[in-house]
Image (cartoon, rainbow, N blue to C red):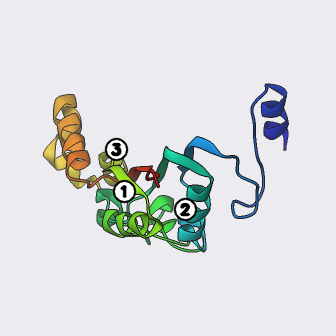
Amino acid sequence: SVLVSRGLDLGYNISQGDIHTVPLPKVDFYLLYEVVEHLVNPLGLLHTIKSKMSPGAHLIVTTPNADGFENVTVPPETEGRFLASALFPPYHLNAFSLKSFYYLCLQSGFDIVDASTPGTLDLSIVNYHNSFLDKLNIFESEPAFISWQESLKASNGSGHMQFILRKTDT
């Protein structure tokens, strides 16, 4: 593709292809940004990546949180609610909660350094599809809006998850 060619021209080491068959380099850091929910075998990919990592290397994985506030309060059948609908096939093959993805990470043998839900758009998405938040005047006060969104993050209730994983030293 044009973007791959441009990246290679700029000197970046880019691999393109099927995530299960493309040769992965042995590196100290991998990033899977919104990938695992699309895979038939996410555990297999985690094992493959782990086999290419040096001891102590890190992997950051992000994926939607099926238990996130907007995913729970705005039903998938809501007109125009693509993201909620996309939690399930044909867009995503897997819908992970914090608990289920935590378990997957443990199955793969990684140490879990951190698990969080650092999203920032939960309240805006919910209010777009259901204006009940307008009655609370949450959008009229930026500090109140920020406080509520921060509480979603702190309680692991945001719509996206981030896991920082570490390959053990063995």
Q: Which mark is residue 170?
A: none
Residue at (26% x, 55% y) in the render: 157
Tag 3 or tag 1, which sits nearer the N-term? Answer: 3
User: Mark 2 = which residue?
Assistant: 46
* SS class, disc 3: loop
- In x, y percent, where is residue 26? 66, 46
* SS class, disc 1: helix
> What's the distance in space between the residues labelled 1 and 3, CA to CA?
21 Å
Tag 1 or tag 2, which sits nearer the N-term? Answer: 2
- Bin the neighbour count of mark 2 within 10 Å (Cα to Cα): few under 14, some 14-19, many 20 and up: many
Kindly identify the amino acid type of the residue bearing the numbered disc 2: Leu
Tag 3 or tag 2, which sits nearer the N-term? Answer: 2
Residue 167 lies left or right of residue 139; in this view the side is right
The image quadrant of residue 77 is bottom left
Residue at (23% x, 35% y) in the render: 146
Furthest residue to the front?
170
Is the Cβ of the residue at disc 1 closer than 8 Å to that at disc 3? no
User: Mark 3 = which residue?
Assistant: 118
* SS class, disc 2: helix
Is the Cβ of the residue at disc 2 closer than 8 Å to that at disc 1? no
Kindly identify the amino acid type of the residue bearing the numbered disc 1: His
Residue 63 lies left or right of residue 35; in this view the side is left
- In x, y percent, where is residue 76? 43, 70
Residue at (41% x, 67% y) in the render: 96
Kindly identify the amino acid type of the residue bearing the numbered disc 3: Pro
User: Mark 1 = which residue?
Assistant: 129
> What's the distance in space between the residues labelled 2 and 1, CA to CA?
35 Å
Compared with 169, 11 (above or below) is: above
Compared with 104, 121 (above or below) is: above
Q: Nearer the viewer, mark 1 or mark 3?
A: 3
